[in-house]
Amino acid sequence: MSRRTIIGKCRICGSVGPLTYEHIPPESAFNDQSVLEPNRDLIIGRDTIEYLDNRKGRTNQRGVGGYTLCGDCNSKTGSWYVPAFTDFSHALYPMCAGLEVYKSGWITLKIKPLNILKQIMTMFCSVNSERYAEVHPEMIRFILNQENRALPDKFRISIALYNLEHSVVLRSTGIASSMDMNNGRLSVFSEISFPPLILMLDVGQYPVDERLTNITWFKNYNYNEVRSINLILKSLPISTPVGNFLTETELRALYTDS
Ligand SMILES: [Zn+2]
């Protein structure tokens, strides 16, 4: 199969030219076909029950991702931030496999908090359109300057554990919104869910789900600074293309009841 050159606008720096394939999450953080279970696909805009009933067991041979970044942004963020994010993912994997669904677990880790946060923001730029970086230039400065800690207060990054046993799909959502019908609160968010982590970027006033652990404070450290930190993380299941955290059984029960 011939590889075409994809020309487009880099979703970080905005330059137009050949784009490189960006793994989201990084290939080294379990995003390759050897680890991805065959019945766990990225589904977008499909009827989930229909999907669950007709699982083919396909795997993405290349790992999940897309042609989103120029070579320069891809290699810079890859060498600056990916190693710290990969170590973080590897340290959390046993918890995502072992912790019971909806339970919280406590862990102490030696990590590079700012590097991890910058990799997470890089991934959120990649799953959103190139317009996203254009309207948030401060986010671009945060990513392309290793030492920059000026992530605006409107960005809230939170994480949870991707419950391996009860999750059936992967999830990657550019900017989306949801409204809580009980109180009329509108949430605006992006999400990347891939074992072992559920990553959430909230930009609205109200976070989409309070059960996730806020890690925005990772921005208060220096680039490459190593810290021992304590985290309490909840294990959540993913069975729908967007929004809710439900097990497959809970989702099927909702469909039956509606
Ligand atoms: Zn670029």
Image (spheres, rainbow, N blue to C red):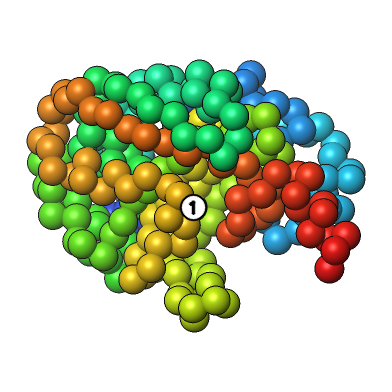
- Categorize mark 1 by other alpha carbons within 10 Å: few (<14), some (14-19), many (20+): many
Task: Kindly tell me whether residue 221 is visible in this rendering.
Answer: yes
Residue nearer the viewer, 10 or 60: 60
Of the 4 image quadrants, the one containing the N terminus is top right
Outermost residue toward the bottom in this view: 184
**From what the image shows, is residue 213 above or below residue 63?**
below
- The residue that appears at 82% across and 52% down in the rendered structure is 252
- The residue that appears at 55% across and 50% down in the rendered structure is 172
Residue nearer the viewer, 185 or 19: 185
The type of residue carrying mark 1 is Glu
Task: Kindly tell me whether residue 15 is visible in this rendering.
Answer: no
Q: Position of residue 181 (x, y in %)?
A: 57, 77
Q: Position of residue 64 (x, y in %)?
A: 58, 38
Q: Position of residue 220 (x, y in %)?
A: 13, 43
On the image, which quarter does residue 99 sit in? Answer: top right
Q: For the residue with label 1, is its CB less than 8 Å from the closest atom of ligand 1?
A: no
Of the 4 image quadrants, the one containing the C terminus is bottom right
Q: Position of residue 83 (x, y in %)?
A: 32, 24
On the image, which quarter does residue 109 sit in? Answer: top left
- The residue that appears at 25% across and 24% down in the rendered structure is 111
Q: Is residue 156 left or right of residue 68?
A: left
Q: Is residue 35 left or right of residue 27?
A: right
**From what the image shows, is residue 77 above or below residue 137?**
above
> Secondary structure under badge 1?
strand
In this figure, which residue is indicated by the disc labeled 1? 191
